[in-house]
Amino acid sequence: MQRYFVLLAVAGLALAGNPERAGQAGATQLLINPYARSSGMGGLNISNCYGIESVIINPAGIALTRRTEFLFSHTRWLVGSDININAFGFAQGFKNGGTLGLAVMAFDMGRFERTTIDNPDGGLGYFSPTILNISVAYAKVFADDRIFVGATLKLIHESIPDAAANGVAFDAGVQYRDKQGNFKLGVALRNVGPQMRYRGEGLSARANLSGAGGTFTNVVQTPAASFEIPSSC
């Protein structure tokens, strides 16, 4: 009987920032895997993932796509919360052993009633938050189809009608597979990037002030605190 040995190089989460600030990380949607096949492994298959799904786990696995691959996924996240995830992926292999991948993940968070300080009970209509991740990845095969190396650039967008935060993150990964497929090794570094911060009119307040010169409007801008993104390896 042929025996297979797969080594999963998983070091767990290495949260961005120091331990005292671990609870302040945002953009945690970067940790969600919308693809059923790889999600069922809980992210532990970084040495064995392949295809466009590897954008989420280990971009090196994209290099196993030698031709063209399309993937679409719809996920009901936390059933009962009305959160849906639509994900689309495309990968194209080239003759030089390289593979280019594009993945888009959009969150449908449902509708929320609009409220203000003056109207805490609502009645002002509804709004829908926007959460969008766009990933562009490239991977290549080396050493006679045994070593695979890949990298991903992620564009992150979160917004409500009057405030938004944008950021970038980088992933990198390596896989080793022997010729017989009995031994596999993988290492991945995910979501490494600068801090993000919300900006927009929603963080400002207007007040009408009266003085000797008449009545005028004063605008006070409240800067939002910056937050880390959830880096992991």
Image (cartoon, helix red, strand yellow):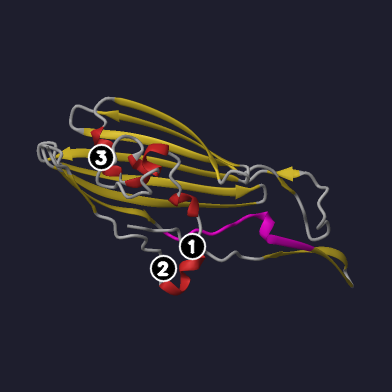
The amino acid at mark 2 is Gly
Q: Is residue 83 magenta?
A: no
Residue 229 relative to residue 183: left or right: right
Q: Quadrant of residue 230?
A: bottom left
Using the image as rendered, state which of residue 219 and residue 44 is in the foreground.
44
The answer to whether marks 2 and 3 mark residues whose Cβ atoms lie closer than 8 Å is no
Say how many tags the image has: 3
Which is more toward the observer, 96 or 29? 29
Label 2 or label 3, whichever comes before in sequence order: 2
Residue 150: percent from the left, percent from the top? 26, 44
The residue drawn where x is 34% and y is 60% is 12
- Quadrant location of residue 1? top left
126 to the left or right of 128: right
- Please give the residue where the numbered disc 2 appears in the rendered image: 17
Q: Which residue is mark 1?
A: 25
Q: Residues within 10 Å of mark 2 (few under 14, many from 20)?
A: some
Q: Amino acid at mark 3?
A: Ala
Find out whether the residues at labels 1 and 2 contact each other: C-beta distance under 8 Å.
Answer: yes
Query: Quadrant of residue 88 in the image?
Result: top left
How far is disc 3 from disc 1 in space, using C-alphas?
28 Å
Q: Which residue is mark 3?
A: 139
Callout 1: SS: loop
Question: Could you give the CA–CA distance between mark 1 and mark 2, rounded to whole angstroms?
Answer: 8 Å
Against 63, is 21 above or below? below
Q: Nearer the viewer, residue 190 or 158?
A: 190
- Boundaries of the magenta span: 194-206
Q: Residues within 10 Å of mark 3 (few under 14, many from 20)?
A: many
| Residue 113 in picture, x, y percent from top left | 75, 48
Distance from the alpha carbon under mark 2 to that under mark 3: 28 Å
SS for tag 2?
A: loop
Upstream in sequence: badge 3 or badge 1 = 1
